[in-house]
Amino acid sequence: MNANGKANTDAHWPAISFAVNGESRTVNVPPMKRLLDVLREDLHLTGTKEGCGEGECGSCSVRMNDELVNSCLVPVLQAEGAEIQTVEGLALDGELDPLQKAFLESGGAQCGICTPGMLMAAAQLLAHRPHPSEAEIREGLAGNLCRCTGFTRIIESVAAAARATESNPATEPALEQTNHAR
Amino acid sequence: MNTHATTRIVGAPVPRKEGVDKLVGRACYVDDIEREGMWYGATVRSTIPRGLIRSIAFDRLIEWSEFTVVTAADIPGENIIQLIIADQPCLADGKVNHCEEPILLLAHPDKHKLREALSGVKIEYDPLPPVFTIEESERQDQIVWGADNLIKSFLLEKGDVDSAWAGAAHIVEGEYRTGAQEHLYIENQGIIAEYSAEEGVTVWGSLQCPYYVFKALRGVFDLPDDKVRVVQTETGGAFGGKEDYPSILASHAALLAKKSGHPVKMVYDRMEDLAATTKRHPARVRHRTALDKDGKLLAIEIHLDTDGGAYATLSSTVLSRATLHSTGPYICPNVRVRAHSWATNHVPYGAFRGFGAPQAVFAMERHMDEIAATLGMDPIELRRKNFLHEGDANATEQLMREPIILDKLLDRALQESDYHAKRLQFARENGRNPIKRGMGIAAFYHGSGFTGSGELYLNSLGGVDVTPEGKVRVLVSNTEFGQGTNTILTQIAAETLGIEYSDVTMAAPDTDMVPNSGPTVASRTSMVVGRLIERACLQLISMLREQASLGATHTREEFFAACERYRAAHGEVSSMCRYEAPPDIYWDDQKYHGEAYGAYAWAIYVAQIAVDTVTYSAEVEGFWAVQEVGRVLHPVLAAGQIEGGVAQGIGYALYEKVVLKEGRMTNNQMTNYIMPTAEDVPPIHVYFEEVPFRYGGFGAKGLGELPHDGPAPAILNAIRDATGVSFNSIPLLPEDLYAGLAASQPVEEPALP
């Protein structure tokens, strides 16, 4: 049920199907409804947050088909057939993902409102650059605003998660040593 | 009153208490909450800065019977938001004094219909002449507030300033200006309200101070205490922006809930939040300083004026803190500070991290570099020569009884930043280089807790109880909004009781459940409330020893077994304490004389800056923050506070401009109100020196606001070092840099008189 007390799907809207955190979902909603609102209102995945509604703050970031998107700028029709990951899909069976562990230990989350989007941006970065330099981390997170931390501890958290997820050095390009902020 | 040399939990980097919830997306912010049968609320606001409301008309094409409409006439109690001065209406009644002033409220089950209806309310006005600047307000041609536009004034005097000028070797004058600044918490303001005749008003929301909202609701609804309940939900950043404004939003949502008979959610979108809610006070600070031939301060005269906006809100207390921080961490025999907060027809300005100190410290520390330049002195040596030391009296003639280690902080800051070597290197390299580099410094203090007798008036009550399930609960109204309240108070309770961190929980921040331990503001939580919890825990241990046979030393299991014996005999296990002032506190609120703050945190900040003389961008390349904040209770959280405050200070200096046209914010979007990103903030190097404060929780002083005070002057001092040009206003955007550098170009360094 959504806030209006109406069913969250309405048969006169076309069905749109996609996978969220590995689970198939179908919604009947206005096709121009923001993916953000579909996640929060129709699928009750409220971990994804709205900060600005115009794609500036990145709080609503989710991963869609291996791209980082601002879900406030994505009409849900564009999600047809997509694979979507939200913050709720990071921890497996209650076990925190290495990024979440690193954020917890290194102080990467303060008020927590940017954290879900920040984790998604970090996950996207590490998926493509498993051992990023500090500059690459800063660039990878530049679309996500945090007003609490000054970013220092978020950058450290991402670097720590990268260190914790040892991958096969033979398949990775050699990168310069990460120069930590502190 | 011990300083706890060895501790198990205090001082350790324990995981943030609510950290896991935040990391898995489970933490419940107000917009994540739905109530059965909930409607949505919206606000019709003034489109003019000042005038009389002539008529309100409703578009006939809208089916208004579906909506709940609330005006000032629906307010059951007083149409006033209770805070300090009773001047701000909950809803405008016949007259508006600023753009975006709330006039009328709408509620509807469908938020999209609600949005359409907003434009269907047509308000006509008879405009009155507005006032937009400190200069216009102080001329008093138009009286827009009270009898004289003056919200508050202070006069602080020490010694005899007037007789000091004649004997001075140097007199240096300067004028410094600071702009408004938006908090830009990433979670916008939001409240859900319910009303029933039996229960009265209940609100849930994003807020800092449950009992401030409680007081406001009690007045607006004319209800007794037991019919008002305020619950803080997980709060996505606040920085002072959720100190006073939630009282307004909660009143609005509750009025709609009462009239509609439904729970009502009001969550602002970013544009409304930016346009309508409080910001940091703009300020103009004029300095006139007398020095002897060696650079010792002889007299400081300051005129400090702020734009308070259309209503008083917290302007008086912000001005107070600005006044008390305006002379910096220096000793000077003769001081006069005249401070005024002027009303204008801007959206009221309010609390923001630092609370007046960033404005005052910007002026003082920028001015110190101007003095050094005038005297041909090294800015470091000028400061060192005038630092306060233990046993000195500051501007309010407060005797500095605690150790002051400014020299040590300064030495460390110079060493860690490699200040002297870099200045030499940059001076060598800058000549031919279009990139000009420089180093700048700021020295400052920040008073912890409420000013003067403020903590005595607050009379905070807090404590702990033990549940039958074997959990200790911390009972306070102090809230978590990222800064670490939950973690710090849990550490203090667990440490003092000799149990584990996981044995302690925080009681819900709900006025039905927790006592009033004061607001979560003013860097007071660790020092003042932390001490309250420490004392309540010590008192509980004594009770258990005396009445439940707890031994002189105990294990965790023995502690909980004793609690159950106590419960069997007395029914419940709880221990509450009231605030007790440190001894020998004297404060004269009229003369602004005496112990302004129980303790001060001290800091030296250094900025390394690069100014590109082709693009006119200024980049902070490195930042070193060295401070003494008493005992550091949690190394990761403490450093996180400093880093976050420095980043906000960098934004204040170089990025964040509130553009006002005819009293209205015109850049009320994140697209064009620019805060620093991960690529703009440099590595921030944080260092603590610890001097435990006897009367703070486990030796803590306040640290949350301190880091916002120093970055702006350090950065602008570095820009002067880099370019030889003085900039005395913030924010300093590329166009301002261009204007200043272009104007200075044909002239070589001006000759000294």
Image (spheres, coloured by chain):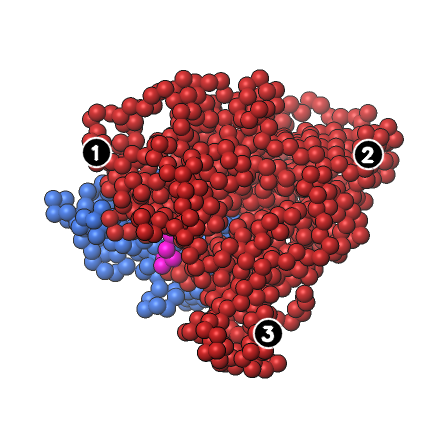
**Which residue lies under the disc numbered 3?**
B542
Between B499 and A17, the one nearer to me in the picture: B499
Which residue is outermost to the left? A12
Chain B hue? red
User: Magenta span has B28?
Assistant: yes
Camera-side residue of B68 and B44: B68
Classify 10 Å Cα crowding around label 2: few (below 14), some (14-19), many (20 and above).
few
Q: CA distance from mark 3 to mark 2?
A: 52 Å
- Magenta part of the protein: which range? B25-32
Identify the residue at image location x=27%, y=44%.
Answer: B261
Q: Is residue B95 above or below residue B620?
A: above
Q: Is residue B552 above or below residue B145?
A: below
Q: Mark 3 or mark 2: name the one nearer the start of the chain.
A: 2
C-alpha separation, residue under disc 3 versus residue under disc 1:
63 Å
Q: Secondary structure at mark 2?
A: loop
Earlier residue among tags 3 and 1: 1
Displayed quadrant of residue B615: top right
Q: Pinpoint residue B504: horizontal percent, then vertical percent.
A: 48, 69
In the rendered structure, the colour chosen for chain A is blue
Q: Callout 3: helix, strand or loop?
A: helix
Give the secondary structure at mark 1.
helix
Q: Quadrant of residue B552?
A: bottom right
Kindly identify which residue carries mark 2: B160
**In this figure, which residue is indicated by the disc labeled 1?**
B65
On the rendered image, what quadrant is the C terminus of chain B found in? top right
Task: State the residue at coordinates (56%, 82%).
Answer: B549
Please give the name of the residue rendered at 84% of the width and 32% of the height, measured from the top-left corner: B164
